């Protein structure tokens, strides 16, 4: 069967949206995707290409190069300082049209999950969101070398296996923390600078300033051995901020459900779950978190889970090793006080 939009034979290579967050940090999930991309590119015998758009994209290339791309396409401009849902898709689509990658991967971040569907729509191709595994098909049924994408389905009760046999590119957003990031010694990649020649007249937004994040994790959440997470039950930013006191005493990091992130109590880099980070700490403490699958799917590898919730029947209790049925903020204050006393802290 042929598809009107795509001559599949013209599409090769594998691309990774190598996202820069908060205009200063290479996203860990992007480096994990480059590592997985390298493996897939080697299996298929094609090139791995990293795409970097930023205010000053060149400064990230030395790190990107360590994760094994054969090609780096980068573009620098003031307008690329923050993700923009008009400029990024336009630039990216132009590059896809020109270079014709067969597989295009994005981290499941706010930017990745905005950019990927816009592109999928433009190319009338398939997109599998929030994947937890990627591999290459080893069967003749639909054609060899197809990308096999796995993602949770039916609220996490099943795993769906998805392929995109007829259109190109094959596209996926991938949850962070599901693959390891591994540096690979290779020859220097080919570096291609894309001139920024965006027509400013097309812009609907004159200027965009994102708030500066003061609360970034010291270590990426994926690597934290203790995670102190808060949800809607913390009820305010003021209460939520007390989680930082606890995490400092315990030597952990603060995480969140989607609710505190949407409420502006903390930054997106602290979000745990399907569209956020995957964590596997020795200890996970969940304050005022109900335990919806989009959050809990990525905490289940925690060694010990403790939940603090006024509702003894909240779904998170089923996963918990210890359940504390209390008001989250009151318990947090008492816990901090007790730990400070025991550790003889002021
Ligand atoms: C496509 C999609 C992707 C998503 N991705 C994510 C994701 O990556 N991460 C994520 O977290 N969510 C994600 N969500 C949202 C997710 O479905 C839930 O809405 C969210 O996780 C709920 O957060 P919560 O537990 O903080 O809030 P709620 O579900 O509202 O739960 C609040 C809990 O606090 C308890 N509580 C209330 N008051 C107190 C108190 N005083 N003391 C103690 N406990 C109290 C309540 O009993 C309740 O159990 C996604 C949703 C969709 C549709």
Image (spheres, grey):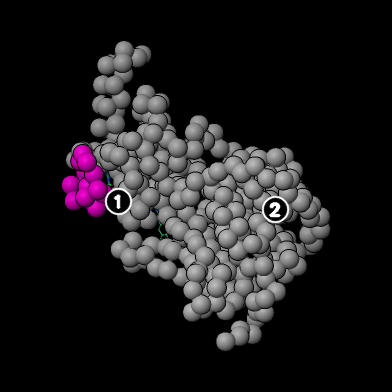
Q: Residue at x 51, y 77 (%)?
A: 140
Question: Does residue 187 appear in this view?
Answer: yes
Q: Which mark is residue 237?
A: none
Where is mark 2, residue-wise?
Answer: 70
Q: Residue at x 72, y 53 (%)?
A: 71
Q: Is mark 1 in CB contact (under 8 Å) with mark 2?
A: no
Q: Secondary structure at mark 2?
A: loop
Residue 19 sits above or below residue 332 on the image: below
Where is mark 1, residue-wise?
Answer: 291
- For label 1, the crowd category at 10 Å Cα-Cα, with few meaning under 14, some 14 to 19 and many 20 or more, is many
Q: Quadrant of the N terminus?
A: bottom right
Question: Does residue 155 appear in this view?
Answer: no
* CA distance separating discs 1 and 2: 41 Å
Magenta range is 309-323
Does label 1 point to a residue whose CB lies under 8 Å from ligand 1?
yes
Main secondary structure along the magenta-highlighted residues: loop
Work out whether residue 145 or residue 243 is closer to the camera in this orientation and state it: 145
């Amino acid at each position: 069967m042929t598809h009107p939009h795509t001559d599949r034979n013209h599409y090769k290579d594998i691309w990774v949206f190598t996202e820069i967050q908060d205009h200063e940090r290479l996203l860990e999930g992007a480096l994990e995707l480059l590592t997985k991309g390298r493996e897939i590119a080697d299996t298929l015998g094609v090139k791995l290409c990293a795409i970097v758009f930023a205010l000053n994209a060149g400064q990230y290339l030395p790190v990107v190069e360590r994760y094994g791309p054969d090609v780096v396409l980068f573009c620098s401009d003031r307008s690329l300082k923050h993700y923009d849902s008009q400029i990024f898709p336009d630039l990216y689509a132009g590059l896809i049209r020109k270079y014709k990658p067969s597989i295009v991967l994005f981290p499941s971040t706010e930017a990745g999950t905005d950019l990927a569907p816009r592109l999928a729509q433009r190319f009338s191709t398939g997109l599998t969101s929030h994947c937890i595994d990627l591999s290459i098909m080893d069967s003749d049924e639909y054609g060899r070398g197809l990308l096999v994408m796995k993602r949770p389905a039916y609220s996490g009760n099943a795993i769906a296996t998805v392929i995109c046999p007829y259109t190109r590119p094959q596209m996926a957003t991938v949850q962070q923390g599901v693959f390891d990031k591994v540096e690979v010694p290779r020859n220097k990649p080919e570096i291609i600078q894309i001139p920024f020649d965006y027509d400013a007249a097309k812009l609907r937004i004159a200027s965009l300033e994102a708030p500066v994040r003061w609360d970034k994790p010291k270590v990426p959440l994926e690597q934290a051995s203790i995670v102190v997470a808060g949800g809607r039950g913390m009820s305010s930013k003021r209460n939520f901020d007390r989680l930082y006191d606890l995490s400092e005493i315990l030597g952990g990091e603060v995480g969140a459900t989607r609710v505190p992130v949407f409420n502006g109590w903390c930054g997106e880099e602290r979000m745990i779950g399907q569209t956020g980070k995957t964590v596997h700490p020795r200890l996970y403490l969940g304050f005022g978190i109900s335990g919806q699958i989009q959050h809990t799917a990525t905490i289940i590898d925690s060694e010990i889970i403790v939940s603090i919730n006024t509702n003894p029947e909240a779904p998170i209790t089923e996963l918990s090793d210890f359940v504390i049925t209390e008001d989250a903020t009151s318990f947090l204050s008492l816990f901090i006080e007790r730990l400070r006393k025991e550790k003889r802290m002021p």
